Image (cartoon, rainbow, N blue to C red):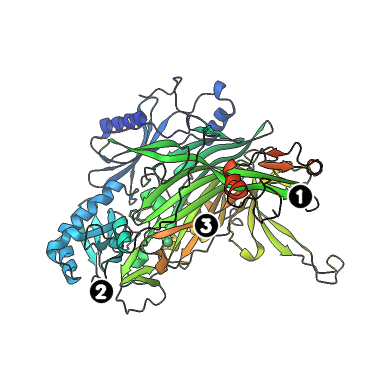
Amino acid sequence: MVSATSASAPHPFDPLSLDEIQAAIGIVKKAHGDVFFNVVSLHEPRKAEMTKWLEDPANTPRPLRIADIVVIAPGGKVYDGLVDLSTGTITKWELLDGLQPIITMEELKNVEYTVRKDPKVIEQCVLSGISKDDMHKVYCDPWTIGFDERHGSKIRLQQALMYYRPNVDDCQYQYPLDFCPIYDAEKQEVIAIDIPKVRRPVSKADPVNYHPAAIEKLGGYRKDLKPINITQPEGVSFTMNGREISWQNWKFHIGFNYREGIVLNDITYNDKGTVRPIFYRLSLAEMVVPYGNPEHPHQRKHAFDLGEYGAGYMTNSLSLGCDCKGSIHYLDADFPTRSGEIRTIKNAICIHEEDDGILFKHSDFRDESVIVTRARKLIIQQIFTAANYEYAIQWVFHQDGTIQPDIRLTGILNTYTMDPEEDTKGWGTQVYPGVNAHNHQHLFCLRVDANIDGPNNTVFMADAVPSDAPVGSPENFYGNAFYAKRTKLDTTGKSKTDYNGATSRTWDICNTSKLHPYSKKPVSYKLVSREAPPLLPKEGSLVWKRAGFARHAVHVTKYRDDQLWPAGRHVPQTSGEPSLGLPEWIGDGTESIDDTNVVLWHTFGVTHIPAPEDFPVMPAEPITLLLRPRNFFTNNPVMDVPPSYASTPSQVAAAGAGVTDATDKMSKLAFANGVNGGSASCCATNGANGVNGH
Ligand code: ABN
Ligand code: CU
């Protein structure tokens, strides 16, 4: 039993500690013997109870610590359970029928070992032009199978995407093989192989690699880079209390789970002494990567990297100076292994500040008085590796109340083999001789559990449009009128909306019971997201059915405990009939979401038509969006951030007396006093020599 009442009791949002995971495992083992542990994670406190505790923690009972458990018992039987850690009791134990839980890293690793020994796989390798003695050079990325109607969802399956490495240090993704074994995780054997009608032998092209020895061979690394060092001689400007962070008026809790990775809870901003709630919970709740090649079996290639593999389970251990620079605070993550041991990922989350360019600036053209204030940002980061791809997830907090989820995609393209003269028919690109990188999308689902100045919020869609009135009419005589048209999304059905670049469409999460004193508009947070392509696979396709959340850029639901994951709780091998998660919660579309506790689900991402520059390793591609305060603060909330330089007209007239100058000395050295020999007055709008200190 793990006491929840001691002084060191965890915050109710904290992930389960190592001790708590061990306790839960012990309790399950005692009751159910040897099972494979798939999930042992925090069962999040019920919101009603948690909200009371957050309001008055000293006088409210602390929500109990409960472990959310998924196990696979002998015979492939899957159980969902709950363990109350305060009493040491199992409060729920439910056998699931035809549902497959998330695939763990350990399960993935078994597959390669099996396929290398399988006689039928060896036969196919030989047909591809690989010697049977070279099976140690054959690799596979074991993917969940998606859904295959021939095999259903009762047996736990993976599809093995096959590759070859002529040498151990070669990048296998340039030697894809053309067949696809199907692996039964319970039997631990290959049960079928999908073999294409048109065979394509393994490529004979010379390897192209990106490791240092390969780059040396190609002429070596660039030699013109001087070091950039980031120093924070007085330390960082944030404070941590357990997993609660305070920085620049922000305060929130940093959680982490096997599936979504970073989860941010109870996000508030101290607005001149008033602590204002903004979001109850923010996370990336799901993602899907549909591939666009119509040939069998590529229709199965649409990984749900969070629901099927887990952004937590796949997270990297981050290293200082590489993944993050500066003064870093790290948080570790603990997970169960299949057998019930503990796996700790050191430095799973890094927290640090970065300079962020100009926060605001104005200079007066009359007299060259100027104010320049530099911004900094706070970054909560994790990076996960989803087989070939890397995803760097940054939750960026800005001083002005903006939150910016920022994702960088890097790593390696998923590839398939082709004859170098073959026509890709537009479904992919030959990125290297014999390498076909199929078109695909990366569609993420951001879950926004809103709390804008209180739990009752309403979502509006805002479109910048011209006046409806014609030119020459009394309302729009000159024809120049335009405005932001606001449409209230007052039912779940109406909330299904898509991005429209032509109207600069945004969505406002409003508290309609609180109006701004000047604008008379409701206090709000605006979702500004310009990378929200539609799901390109057609209505009725397998991925359309399975990834219901990706059908629209925005859906809004009424909050319910446990509605966390928009493609369902157990995603592998769902058929999409019915579509789980968000389509179920949207229901017939009649539920009111007006002035209530709402959750906004936002699907955004990129459509990736690969190009040779993406190979053999992709330069990181950023995707970003903003949650911005609008009509929320009385006026600019960052005027109290100390400026780097500030002079008023009277100070300019008095030749600089009283000017505030906190510019960094290195900049002056480099450009003003040093190289260019100009004056050290850094902020004149057009310095005589054209060089400013900033
Ligand atoms: N991107 C699909 C995937 C993720 C993890 C492991 C295998 C495959
Ligand atoms: Cu991509």
Q: Is mark 1 within 8 Å of ligand 2?
A: no
Instruction: From the viewer's side, name the closer residue of 206 and 172.
Output: 206
Comes first in the chain, label 2 or label 3: 2
Tell me the kind of residue under disc 3.
Phe
Q: Nearer the viewer, mark 1 or mark 3?
A: 1
Instruction: From the viewer's side, name the closer residue of 236 and 214.
Output: 214
Query: Is residue 609 visible to us here?
Result: yes
Residue 78 screen position, x and y as percent: 30, 45
Q: Hey, which quadrant is residue 52 in on the image?
A: top right
| Crowding near the residue tagged with mark 2, few <14, some 14–19, many ≥20 C-alpha atoms within 10 Å | some
Which residue is label 3 attached to? 604
Marks 1 and 3, how far apart at CA = 43 Å
Residue 47 screen position, x and y as percent: 53, 36
SS at mark 2 in the image: loop
Comes first in the chain, label 1 or label 3: 1
Marks 2 and 3, how far apart at CA = 35 Å
Q: Hey, which quadrant is residue 382 in on the image?
A: top left
Q: Nearer the viewer, mark 2 or mark 3?
A: 2
Vertical placement of residue 13 versus 470, above or below: above
Tell me the kind of residue under disc 2.
Arg
Name the residue located 80 percent from the left edge and 44 percent from the top edge. 649
Marks 1 and 2, how far apart at CA = 69 Å
Mark number, residue 200: 2
SS at mark 1 in the image: loop
